[in-house]
Image (spheres, coloured by chain):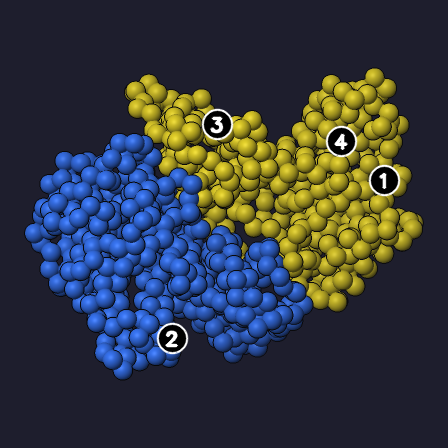
Chain colours: A blue, B yellow
């Protein structure tokens, strides 16, 4: 049994403290540095952007985790991505880690670094250096929201969740916060595919995407001591946290007015279903129709057909919410009541589109937002 | 030697006549049927959409060309795509061909059919049947523009070009018109990659994309009789026509205010260079920056890095027009004059962005437009 906690976040699991401050990196004066610390060194699983242009903190963390899979703290700044900053950028990322290790009295390579913000500017190291002692001083156990807010950039809403899993031997808690999206860690890589990698705002992969999971073991329980069904629940709970965070990212997508689940059913494989769902989720034509509250099945079907995944047009059925609009690849004639129901679906803030391929047994979902004037405005006017 | 003809188009080569009429398929009352006819049966090369959801005329033409690679005429309608129309749709496409063959007194399978417009509606065959005799009656040799205008849908501008190649033995003329984009024919497949397949408005592949090349031999010259250098000129001239048409499509992209050439140089292979250029051309972040007249090198570089193509961030240089903004992956400090020059480049209606990878000898270009409020407006408000 597991359940989401109200106002949960990175500090919900035992032994984690955090803090967030305004270090003056952002011109807006919003919070722009954050620290998460575990009482004990935590087993660390991390996955980073696949972009060939990797930011300095990504390169630093990858190197730090190459030999030891443990970390005790993560220091984060927003407002500057420390990307395209060359050797000096790498030295700066390293210095952020070292200063945090010294301030926390930790061994070398026990602190990871994350940066997010504008590209191509050297880090304002004077502000970072002044910020770290303040972060350490302010560490406290009720700082989930403080941490979550300090890592945001152009996004607006706090993305923070935690879940409790009740097992026979006791309680395990998972908490998380995010901005942006990424990949993930060995055993649970499949879960990442269906959460952080199953969402798309515009399909772009940044220079800084990072996903770090810390397990400090302070619940006193070990994964391998759980029963098989409890292990299943743990994975489901972790998936719930990751999907909740991932959906928050989409809801808060630039200019987004809608969150749409694209569900592909009866596909040949899970991988193909997920790829097709993601592909439709990046179709500008489909996303503009969602913004226009137009139940445009033609753009969904056409995008599915050009995804490169297997399908037979004549076998496919399509639903908006519960309203079937397409059967065997042909539009159904809808009566007045059905047409009204269809338009009610696409006027909702969140709804589901289901494409049933009828060529196999696999299914998957991706989550996307609409493409609005707001998206263009934000991205045409926001300068790196 | 070859040169573009003024006001050239499908009727420029010897032996071709055409016509365009208002058959009443479009509610707007604009021209919506067109016919192109060759005096002699023409060698025909055609390539069709790779979308798994193929419109009826695409399926019909593919079947018709399977055994004979000749065609004498092409009948086109706009306003209805005849896609997702099942068996009846196929019969309707076949009937369009047959009626045209009968009216022109041609043998079966000598007429190809193209449709473009809304998806999921059966063809208004009464209008088609009434239109065909009118098209035949109106066929004339100065109808390039008439033909070009009757095939448009949401696009606004005529896309029509012709080129004359002067060889030792005489003159060969190539003419073309288009809306939308496609793939192409065996020997010149590489040319298609660098023209119709090198452009992107939003990366979507339609159910109806079709590219047909007719060669009626009435210049009296055969390709294999040309000298090697003349064959090279022929290919260059064909490329010029196809690139000119392809660029017209981008210029007339929904809501487009700019045409940008994305040039990748010193890449490992032509294929990788082209793929990277196309990938950047579909990045919404990069395209919004182009609309905002923001020389946002970060989004270009980041998109290149996530294209899946080989590159080394530290080796790359980037230019907007002639202004170098990035060297070895790091932004260059620009003085006041250079900054002014940079902003002048991105304020132009057409400009070039060059990314030099410095890891090989290959290069390629793709052409894209910006992503504007107009794109969202057109695609949020236009209902299939």
Q: Report which quarter residue B141 is drawn in.
A: top right
**Residue B220: percent from the left, percent from the top?**
89, 27
Marks 4 & 1, CB-CB < 8 Å contact: no
Q: Which residue is mark 4?
A: B174
Question: In which chain is the residue bearing label 4?
Answer: B
Q: Which residue is mark 3?
A: B358
Disc 4/disc 2 C-alpha distance (Å) = 65 Å
Q: Quadrant of the N terminus of chain B?
A: top right
Left or right: A299 as drawn, with respect to B344 = right
**Residue B184: percent from the left, percent from the top?**
71, 42
Disc 2/disc 1 C-alpha distance (Å) = 65 Å
Q: Label 2 neighbourhood size at 10 Å, few (<14), some (14-19), many (20+)? A: few
Q: Label 3 neighbourhood size at 10 Å, few (<14), some (14-19), many (20+)? A: some
Q: Is residue B303 above or below residue A282?
A: above
**Pair 3/1: label in front:** 3
Question: Looking at the image, which is closer to me, A286 or A189?
Answer: A189
Label 1 element class: strand
Left or right: A52 as drawn, with respect to B211 = left
Disc 3/disc 1 C-alpha distance (Å) = 45 Å
Residues tagged by mark 2 and mark 3 found on one chain of the structure: no
Q: Which residue is mark 2?
A: A232
Q: Report which quarter residue A162 is drawn in.
A: bottom left
Q: Label 4 neighbourhood size at 10 Å, few (<14), some (14-19), many (20+)? A: many
**Residue A337: percent from the left, percent from the top?**
52, 78
Question: Looking at the image, which is closer to me, A25 or A97?
Answer: A97
């Amino acid at each position: 049994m597991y359940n989401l906690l109200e106002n949960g976040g990175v500090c919900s699991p035992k032994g984690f403290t955090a803090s967030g401050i305004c270090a003056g990196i952002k011109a807006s004066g919003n919070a722009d540095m954050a620290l998460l610390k575990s009482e004990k060194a935590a087993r660390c699983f991390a996955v980073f952007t696949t972009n060939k242009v990797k930011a300095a903190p990504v390169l630093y963390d990858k190197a730090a985790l190459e030999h030891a899979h443990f970390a005790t703290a993560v220091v984060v700044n927003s407002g500057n991505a420390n990307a395209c900053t060359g050797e000096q950028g790498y030295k700066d990322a390293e210095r952020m880690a070292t200063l945090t290790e010294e301030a926390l009295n930790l061994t070398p390579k026990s602190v990871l670094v994350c940066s997010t913000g504008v590209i191509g500017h050297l880090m304002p190291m004077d502000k970072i250096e002044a910020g770290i002692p303040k972060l350490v001083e302010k560490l406290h156990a009720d700082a989930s929201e403080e941490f979550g807010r300090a890592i945001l950039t152009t996004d607006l809403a706090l993305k923070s969740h935690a879940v409790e899993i009740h097992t026979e031997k006791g309680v395990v808690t998972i908490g998380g916060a995010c901005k942006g999206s990424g990949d993930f860690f060995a055993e649970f890589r499949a879960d990442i595919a269906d959460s952080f990698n199953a969402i798309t705002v515009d399909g772009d992969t940044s220079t800084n995407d990072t996903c770090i999971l810390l397990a400090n073991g302070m619940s006193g329980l070990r994964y391998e001591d759980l029963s098989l069904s409890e292990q299943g629940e743990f994975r489901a709970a972790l998936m719930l946290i990751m999907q909740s965070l991932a959906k928050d990212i989409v809801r808060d997508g630039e200019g987004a007015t809608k969150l749409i689940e694209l569900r592909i059913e009866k596909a040949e494989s899970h991988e193909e279903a997920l790829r097709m769902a993601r592909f439709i989720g990046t179709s500008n034509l489909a996303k503009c129709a969602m913004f226009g509250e137009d139940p445009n099945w033609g753009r969904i079907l056409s995008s599915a057909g050009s995804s490169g995944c297997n399908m037979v047009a004549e076998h496919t059925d399509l639903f908006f919410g519960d309203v079937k609009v397409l059967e065997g690849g042909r539009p159904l004639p809808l009566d007045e009541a059905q047409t009204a129901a269809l338009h009610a679906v696409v006027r909702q803030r969140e709804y589901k589109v289901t494409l049933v391929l009828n060529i196999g047994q696999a299914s998957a979902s991706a989550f996307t937002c609409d493409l609005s004037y707001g998206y263009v405005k934000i991205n045409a006017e926001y300068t790196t």
